[in-house]
Image: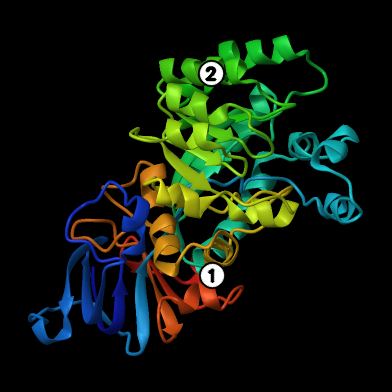
Amino acid sequence: MSLLIRNIKCLVQVRDQVTKWVQGMEMGDLPCLENAYLFLDHGIIEDYGAMNSLPELQPNHEIDATDRLVFPSFVDSHSHIIFAGSRENEFVDKIKGLSYQEIAGKGGGILNSAKRLQNTDQEELYQWALKRVREVISLGTGALEIKSGYGLTLEDELKMLRVARRLQNETPLTIKTTFLGAHAFPQELSREQYLDQIINQMIPAVAEQGLADYCDVFCETGFFTPNESQAVLEQGLKFGLKPKIHANQLNLSGGVQVGVKVGALSVDHLETVGQQEIDALKGVDTIATLLPGAAFFLGTGYPPARRMMEENLPVALASDYNPGSAPNGNMPLILSLACIQMKMTPEEAINAATINGAYAMDLSNTHGSITKGKVANLFITKEIPSYSFIPYAFGSNLVDQVILNGKLIEHSTI
């Protein structure tokens, strides 16, 4: 099956060659092609160019994109999209002034989500997650990382990862999965007992069943220490799980340094960052993934994106979609927050949510840009004046049509 999109007002993120990432001031350059065509064949980007050079083609289908823009789909490299129930009561507690730690102390937070998930069967979890997947696809996301971490028992962590794998197999979304058993400590076990269970039971079981691509840890004051985090991630590496890490969300936790030390693909959050953390990220293959949705929802400081780019670092953007601190998977809104609150330009934000997000999911060769040979995951906007209008019109859904794996997606068929 082939598809020709013609008369594209602006074809965004066009790169002739596969690019690892863009970093520093290079993030301000967003290559685009005006008055363009795009030809997709068998789920792959086959050709593109200016309309005045359109060759003779025999596509199965055509789309006229006059006055509309075409983007590569967003790559959301950090989410907790599988969860049971919402936590709006805690949202009200936050409004009344309770801190993250105080809410956790009264049975809220991650342990609240864990209790709910443990009491929810796998099919129900899948159906809830499927609704959220449909939502994020309609908002332009074409690739999504999904973490476990609300199970906190061997069987419930496996249950979450089975749901993620099913979403991977039964929806057109490109999905990578992450084992995050080290998300919090369950009340019924001692710290030592649970760490032993993660290292000697959970990680081997996850690897044996082929349920995860990555291993992650919440390295934070009150949660997992740097030494504990390193032990978990190193065990994951032994079993073929690449490391990722939640780092420096609430405090200078040492998580960035641990991530760099173990060769993590990404260090995520970074709301609290000093010069030592920035220096640690220079010259390494670990990318900083920033989650402004969490900072917005929790009312904390935002990651210093501008400073990181000025220090020639690459940064990615992701949603952190989860029930407690970022109950939203709207990547265009994440672009808006990045521009408004972190002073990223639209070009920088789009690069961070596409090509750099692809790196943070190990998808640089297949996703994140309009490049010949890459997977045909993209979206066509409504009639808008420019790509800057996406973050400008915050909260609006400006996605008109979604194409995943070269096929036009009908919401009802996902």
Q: Is residue 71 left or right of residue 101?
A: left
Please, what is the three-letter code of the amino acid marked with disc 2?
Gln
Q: How many marks?
A: 2
x, y percent for residue 15: 22, 61
Which type of secondary structure does the marked residue at label 2 adopt?
Answer: helix
Please, what is the three-letter code of the amino acid marked with disc 1?
Ser
2 and 34: which is toward the camera: 34
Q: Quadrant of the N terminus?
A: bottom left
Image: 58 above or below 25: below
Q: Is residue 355 among the parts visible in the rendering?
A: no
Instruction: Count residues near mark 2 (Cα–Cα under 10 Å), then give few for <14, some for 14-19, many for 20+.
Output: many
**Quarter-of-image position of residue 9:** bottom left
Image: 12 above or below 36: above
What scheme was used to colour the molecule?
A: rainbow
Q: Is residue 109 left or right of residue 404?
A: right
Residue 230 is tagged as: 2
Mark 2, mark 1: which one is toward the viewer? 2
Alpha carbon separation for disc pair 2 and 1: 43 Å
Instruction: Count residues near mark 1 (Cα–Cα under 10 Å), then give few for <14, some for 14-19, many for 20+.
Output: few
Q: Is residue 237 among the parts visible in the rendering?
A: yes
Report the residue marked by disc 1: 412
Q: Residue at x 79, y 34 (%)?
A: 111
Q: Mark 2 and mark 1 in contact? Answer it, CB < 8 Å.
A: no
206 and 229: which is toward the camera: 229
Which type of secondary structure does the marked residue at label 1 adopt?
Answer: helix
**Quarter-of-image position of residue 27:** bottom left
x, y percent for residue 163: 57, 41
Q: Residue at x 40, y 45 (%)?
A: 311
x, y percent for residue 119: 78, 36
Residue 350 is tagged as: none
